[in-house]
C-alpha cells in the first residue's frame, strides 16, 4: 500500500486494487472506504497515533467495503 499526502489532514491509501481516504481531525480519524478484505492490517498501520472513530463506505463493492467488518 502506498500512502499519498493529498492535503495536510488527508491521506490517500493506494492499494493494488482500489483506494481509501483517511481524514485526520486532531487524534480522531475518519476512513472513507476500506479496500479489499485483506487490507485491514495495512490500514491499521497507517493510522499511526490516531484513533479511528468513523468509517464511511461509498458503496458495497469488494474493493470499497471488503475490510469494513474487520476494522
Image: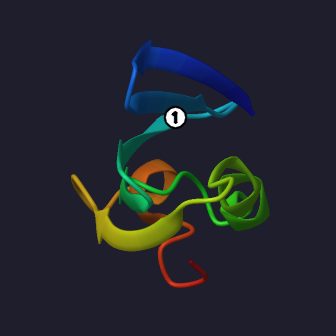
Q: Is residue 4 above or below residue 43?
A: above
Image x and y of residue 16, in percent:
70, 30
For label 1, the residue is 18
| Spot occupied by residue 9 in the image (x, y as percentages of width and height) | 37, 31
Work out whether residue 62 or residue 2 is closer to the camera in this orientation and state it.
2
* Neighbourhood count class around disc 1 (C-alpha, 10 Å): few under 14, some 14–19, many 20 upward: some
- Please tell me whether mark 1 sits on a helix, a strand or a loop: loop
Which residue sits at x=22%, y=52%? Answer: 58
Q: Residue 15's spot in the image, x, y percent?
A: 65, 34
Given residues 12 and 17, the one toward you in this image is 12
Q: Quadrant of the N terminus?
A: top right
Relative to residue 4, is residue 49 depicted above or below? Answer: below
| Residue drawn 35% across the image and 43% down it | 23
Q: Give the residue drawn at x 77%, y 64%.
A: 41
State the count of labels: 1
Query: 19 or 3: nearer the eye?
Result: 3
On-image quarter of the C terminus: bottom right
Q: In the rendered view, does 13 fall on the left or right side of 43?
A: left
Amino acid at each position: 500500500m502506498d500512502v499519498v499526502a493529498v492535503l495536510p489532514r488527508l491521506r490517500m491509501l493506494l492499494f493494488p486494487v482500489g483506494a481509501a481516504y483517511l481524514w485526520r481531525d486532531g487524534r480522531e480519524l475518519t476512513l472513507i472506504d476500506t479496500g479489499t478484505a485483506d487490507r485491514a492490517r495495512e490500514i491499521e498501520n497507517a493510522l499511526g497515533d490516531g484513533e479511528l472513530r468513523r468509517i464511511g463506505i461509498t458503496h458495497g463493492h469488494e474493493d470499497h467495503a471488503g475490510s469494513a467488518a474487520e476494522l
